[in-house]
Image (spheres, coloured by chain):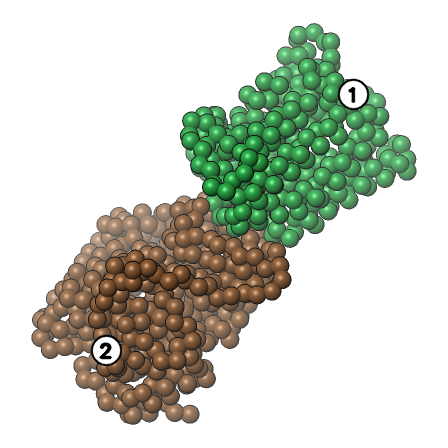
Amino acid sequence: MPSLIDVMLEGRQVQQHRPWPRATVDASVWTFAASELAQGRWSLLGLWGEPSTVHMAIMDGYAADIVVVSLDCPDCVYPSVGKHHPPALRLERTINDLFGLSAEGLPDTRPWLDHNRWGVRFPLGNRINALPKAPPYRFLPAEGGGLHQVAVGPVHAGTIEPGHFRFAASGETVVRLEERLGYTHKGIEGLMIGASVESAAQLAGRVSGDSTVAYAFAFSRAAEAALQLVVPDRGIWLRALLAELERLANHLGDVGAICNDASFALMHAHCSVLRESVLRASNTAFGHRLMRDIIVPGGVTHDLSDEGKEIIQMALDNVRLRFPALVELYDNTASLQDRTVDTGVLNPALAKQYAAGGYVGRASGRSFDARRTLAYPPYDDLRFEVPVLNEGDVNARIWIRVREVEQSLSLIDQILDRIPEGPPRARAGQLREPREGMAIVEGFRGDILVWLRLRDGRVERCHLRDPSWFQWPLLEAAIEGNIVADFPLCNKSFNCSYSGHDL
Amino acid sequence: MLLVLLLAPLLTGFVRKMKARLVRRQGASVFQPYRDLLRLLRKEVVLADNASWLFRVTPYVTFAAIWVAAALVPTFATGLLFNWTADLIAIVALLGSARFFLALAGMDVGTSFGGIGSSREVMIAALAEPAMLLFVFCIALVAGSTQLSTVANFMASSYVGLRVSLGMAMIALIMVALAENARIPVDNPATHLELTMVHEAMVLEYSGRHLAMIEFGVFLKLLLYISLIACVFLPWKIAVFGAGPLSYAIGAVAYLVKLAAAGFFLALFETATAKMRVFRVPQFLGAALMLGLLGTLLLFVSKSF
């Protein structure tokens, strides 16, 4: 079995790419890598474009080795990965929408993010005028007697993010679900081009509001890797504190929200109160409820005072006091268990194939957690467990969250205990030559990948890949055979990001 | 007849307030449903292009049917204005026709949600109505009449005693009432999730005064069922026809207390339960049907049950 190193040696290694290597390869190696992905030996971490290059990040799960392979495509054509490895399909459609690079042999050539409302095509590549009239988007057919279609969204009855879902149902049973996303495309990758590192970090923090810390964290780590900037210890520990507070707040909110979708409002009310207590503590300690714009390349902008420490500790004590009772309530409410157990089962093989991160993967037997597998600081120095379950149903996804809340509580305790003194931030020097950096950080949904190239202190190209890219397709698989009325429950238990995905 | 019209929104407002308090929320005022109705009545109606006359007529038809049905139930006294026509079977029929029109209207515009809502509603109704009828038979066998005033008078008298069949009928009626009023665990009246709705999905296309009529119908229906349960199974202090004004006053106060208690228990139950899967609903209502049937059978076997 060839290792990733062999792939690298086939190509020409790019200098100044950190911390993992990047190599420019030819089409045959590219195709070979795609077929290895399809065999399930490696997992796909990301696939993104540049005006005349495509990049693919691959991970070898056993060795925790990561490489980026790049393929120059001056003719705007490259061999499709999605043809062999379905998780790449939507990524390749996106590359086509944004850059006009087409994947040869791609089975699905419909646009993905581009709804023909931008007034321009290929905004990041060679721009051309938009089509005068968009051809209608054809949903995948489902044929058979008695099937009917249900179209939901993009505008929903509640105030949630926009996304369109097309169900083909036989009575109440879902035969096929197809998602259509892209309604919240903000052009963040376009805005990043030419931005200074500081403003790019702010942009990164606005990709997905509930993961603002994780995005800023990932972007900063990538920028620091590129600039070879050393972050002071206190800054490193403070970042982990911020990330865990965000995870804690989001998981608490999610547990309640999932129960609310089974019309169990009691849980929602109590969990919301707990989430709010964490957010308020964050507000007092760091000056922002969601802790936006606090992590920057070089460290953090807001140091933690002793008073802030105490307030966080109080919020934790509150959660620790009340959360176990709520978990018990969840576990003992038969009518609720009846809804969550065995609903929306995600096959572990699919979770592995799509390299699904976060609770989606961990509820289906995939133990990957960037904090453990890649052990970026300070997590290499902290004790925590990565909970894994194999059932893959809504119940399992709730339990993973519950366990992670407990782990986050313990992590925050350790951090508050052992946080070193010192300055929280280092200043970056200017570097003129191009530098490339990459980082993977565990957000509450899963692993966020950021890849960037800096030149003259400005961002030349930055790609941000949300964990939802590999979770949305799995939702389609998980809902199959369930009833239409259970979709909101499954959807909430996945809780994929629309904003982070549409970018 | 006016009384039910005035009380119905208050009852719904009270249940909502209780539910909010139970999950530690402040909750809207108990008078909010009145304001909602006024607001809806002032708003213009948005109609789908392909809506037929049926779609426009249905809100009034359903409202009228439910209103008449609600007025037939003796609230605080028997022998009220309309009570001489108050036949239980007539009430069931009125409610059934209201639902029939609403289900038709749900499918009229041709949106998928309306279709889903109608099909689920009819599925529920197909089981709830027989259960309701069995309850009627059970009561009729005991009281010797399907006339509600007579039933209430009989129940209030001391001839009844403790009967197993009546207990079964009561449980069956409560289960039917939960299903018919689209409450948890069958349906969630407060949901924003289109895909899980039953009743709400059916009326998703309505707006303005049409929606006000339908909402009002829903309020009335809740009041109707609670009044029905109260007058058949808990007829204490209900004023008998021809009694003095004092006993009417006592009857009215007792009625309000019963409504409040029922509203509170409803809120408590809804807070403590999650919604069941759509396909569990037939089992739930099947149980109600069986209970009604058993009650009736027991009465056939022996008069003393």
Q: Which mark is residue A439?
A: none
Note whether A287 is above or below A444 in the view shown. Answer: above
**Residue type, mark 2 in image:** Ser
Q: Residue at x 65, y 31 (%)?
A: B225
Note whether A136 is above or below B289 in the view shown. Answer: below
Q: Which mark is residue B150?
A: 1
- Using the image as rendered, state which of residue A304 and residue B64 is in the foreground: B64
Q: Residue A473 at what x, y percent from top left?
A: 45, 67
**Residue type, mark 1 in image:** Thr
Q: Residue B227 at what x, y percent from top left?
A: 66, 26
For residue A117, say whether it is visible. Answer: yes
Residue furthest out toward the front: A132
Q: Residue A244 at what x, y percent from top left?
A: 34, 60
Task: Give the labeled residue for mark 2.
Answer: A52
For residue A405, say whether it is visible. Answer: no
Note whether A250 is above or below B200 in the view shown. Answer: below
Residue furthest out toward the top: B244
- Using the image as rendered, state which of residue A448 and residue A423 is in the foreground: A448
Identify the hue of chain A.
Answer: brown
Q: Would you call the spot at circle 1 few (<14 residues within 10 Å), some (14-19), or many (20 or more)?
A: many
In what element is the residue under mark 1? helix
Identify the hue of chain B.
Answer: green
Q: Residue A312 at what x, y percent from top left?
A: 31, 52
